[in-house]
Image (cartoon, rainbow, N blue to C red):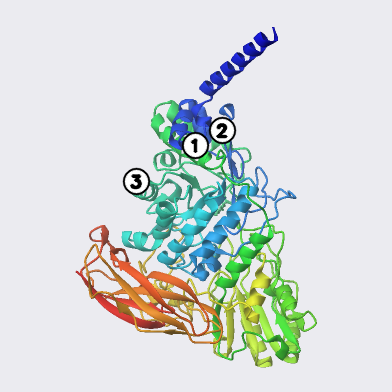
Amino acid sequence: MKAKHFLFSTILTVFILHISAQTKPVYLDNSQPIEVRVKDALSKMTLDEKVKLCTAQSKFSSHGVPRLGIPEIWMSDGPHGVRMEILWDSWGHANWTNDSCTAFPALTCLAATWNPKMSTLYGNAVGEEARYRRKDVLLGPGVNIYRTPLNGRNFEYMGEDPYLASKMVVPYIQGVQKNGVAACIKHYVLNDQEKWRGHINVELSDRALYEIYLPAFKAAVTEAGVWTIMGAYNKIRGEFACENNLTLMKILKDEWKFDGCVITDWGGAHNTKLAALNGLDIEMGSWTNGFTSNKAFAYNDYFLARPYFQLLKSGQLPTSNVDEKASRILRLIFRTAMNVNKPYGALANEEHHNADRAVGEEGIVLLQNTAKLLPIVASKYKTIAVIGENATRKLTEGGGSSELKVKREISPLQGLKEKFGAEKVKYSLGYASGAVSYDQVLKSKLNPDSLLKAAVKLASESDIVIFVGGLNKNTQQDSEGDDRRSYALPFGQNELIAELQKANKKVVLVMLSGNAYEMPWIKQATTLVQAWYIGSEAGHAIANVLAGDVNPSGKLPFTFAAKLNDYGAHSFGAIAYPGDSINEVYKEDILVGYRWFDTKKIAPQFPFGFGLSYTTFGYGKVTANKKAMTADGQIIVSFPVKNTGTVKGKEVVQLYINDQKSSELRPEKELKAFQKIELNPGEEKTVTFTVDKSALQFYSDVKKDWTAEAGKFTVLIGTSSRDIKGKVEFELQ
Ligand code: BGC
């Protein structure tokens, strides 16, 4: 009897297992290819369910398919850390107690490392934090091109050069996505200023679009395989970026074969039909975007919600339209929320803080050190004055959507005290910027004269002064939603710096900003360090560099002009920046950043690619393996670099190309390769670069295609865009 029962239950179990294996839907079967699962899920969904996938259900999440157990998508800003939780329906902080993160350096600082390995480290660490916080999409990184130093969001981007930005963005994305979290490359495209970002219509040549503004986005898509992209707020040639046929359909989806999702910037959709037909996949932030009206619980009224459903239902739009969008969204869900193989992530651990510090240390740029005050040998000084609001201000807060709630933030003052001894270091505020406010400039209640006097007094009584100033994340500074009003440093810092320079011969200027600024005091400044926004470990990174425990090796990812009107974007009147409130014409065309300064022979204050070290490097003769290159061939350029100083250091070796003669305008030179190498004192290494046709071509506005013209080219090897150490010529046949 017992045996019979056993046999019966075994058969039953096998039968049930068989049935359930057979009935387990294909879309839930992880062993199946994603495309098969996407098709299967889609075939089981109603029209309503497909449409639902396309819109937000809260401030930072979009719908899943509850009936089928397909999860929602959860998103978070980006790009310098995982933003604190935000309320369901408004921008307010949700005040959770488990969402304190690591703040990583601003992307300008990452770009300034010129080291793609730092992008890998950064991307992986921030990806782990996003994963731990159960996010499916991290809203970053940003690669809008640095066109004007007034752009409030330059700190979130990777500088003025499309090649540098491309090389630096790819490993960041790969690092994030390794964690089963999608990166969201933003803001596609031409959102190069904050002023009037919601409506300004950008006009530019195809050539400028393809050569300058698109390459970093293209690299994100075609090299990194980014899973999502964020449409910008602005218009491009008359159409909003989130509903733009040229940039979304023709370029992104047809030319680049993007297989991921186009997500709006928050409130970036404007028209159901255009959004449907021109490639938008997920609509976020409409009406609750803080810029237009605040219509709560409006999700059903989104452009891609009820109005979209009605167009599909009535046959005015084909169902293939929503099938295409839903397939992309399902693909994203399988890659992220339903990815059973993803790691678990980690939040604000030592490893991540170390990554932040490492990137920060490599990104800090030494701009001037003529009096050899750096590195600071603490034993030489009895008293060290630290002056300036940025020495103590929380710079991980503010700035707009990249604001962070951190577990740790080491201020420069704290870092310097730890490094040089708290008893030696005395602090004075020097200037005050006023309270942090996202949408209002609040004047400080403190008296600027008394602050200045106290600081000057401390400076005159101290052996050395470390001034920590720059911009901050307050509105109209380095902050979202508006641009800077002036190229000058704010809050009376110029006057203060001039007074400090009079009071003490030894003044070290440490500037924290994501943008260039005017330097009226530069002739008197012996010592200048550009230290960006570094995040949680800022104070440690800065102190390590100032003390010489770390030898600086960052290089500027954008040009510091002597004055604002020296920039191309500011040379053509208001229509070129900020526009006439309706249109803006990029009149400088392809001559952005150093391309402009070099071609127009304008001396910058500090050029693109510039940065000093505590050691020196000697460059040997540059040679090429051939004199001529065929159209499908390549040439190899090599030269020795030697550390001629007394400390170990890293050098960023830069390769620029000059086209000697062309039927269309070419910039004086363009960056086409770089390498960061490390050398011990006395050590020499041979650096080798391979140059092929891709480094020689330009986008012809006449042919409407990339072309490389036969003729002579010069390879320029430099330690910056202006300090060329060697050249070699060759001919393209
Ligand atoms: C910003 C985006 C951000 C989004 C969500 C927008 O205002 O432009 O960069 O990801 O808000 O916070």
Q: Residue at x 51, y 21 (%)?
A: 22
Describe the element under mark 3 as helix, strand or loop. helix
- 204 left or right, relative to 92: left
How many angstroms separate mark 3 from mark 2 (CA)?
A: 28 Å
| Dot label at residue 516 | none
Label whose residue precedes the other's in the sequence (2 or 1): 2
Q: Amino acid at mark 3?
A: Asp
Q: Is mark 1 within 8 Å of ligand 1?
A: no
Instruction: Residue 536: name its quadrant.
Output: bottom right
Instruction: Residue 121: name its quadrant.
Output: bottom right
How many angstroms separate mark 3 from mark 1 (CA)?
A: 20 Å
Instruction: Please tell me whether residue 217 is drawn above or below residue 410 in the rendered image.
Output: above
Horizontal and vertical percent for residue 441? 65, 65
Q: Residue at x 57, y 74 (%)?
A: 364
Question: Label 2: which residue?
Answer: 70
Instruction: Please tell me whether residue 428 is drawn above or below residue 23 in the rendered image.
Output: below
Horizontal and vertical percent for residue 494? 61, 82
Q: Amino acid at mark 1?
A: Leu
Q: Amino acid at mark 2?
A: Ile
Question: Label 1: which residue?
Answer: 330
Instruction: Residue 425: name its quadrant.
Output: bottom right
Label whose residue precedes the other's in the sequence (3 or 2): 2
- The crowding category of the residue bearing disc 2, from other C-alpha atoms within 10 Å (few below 14, some 14 to 19, many at least 20), is some
Instruction: Please tell me whether residue 630 is drawn above or below residue 24 in the rendered image.
Output: below
Dots 3 and 2: beta carbons under 8 Å? no
Question: Label 3: which residue?
Answer: 254
Query: Quick one: which residue is furthest to the right in this view?
Result: 423
Of residues 6 and 200, the one nearer the viewer is 6
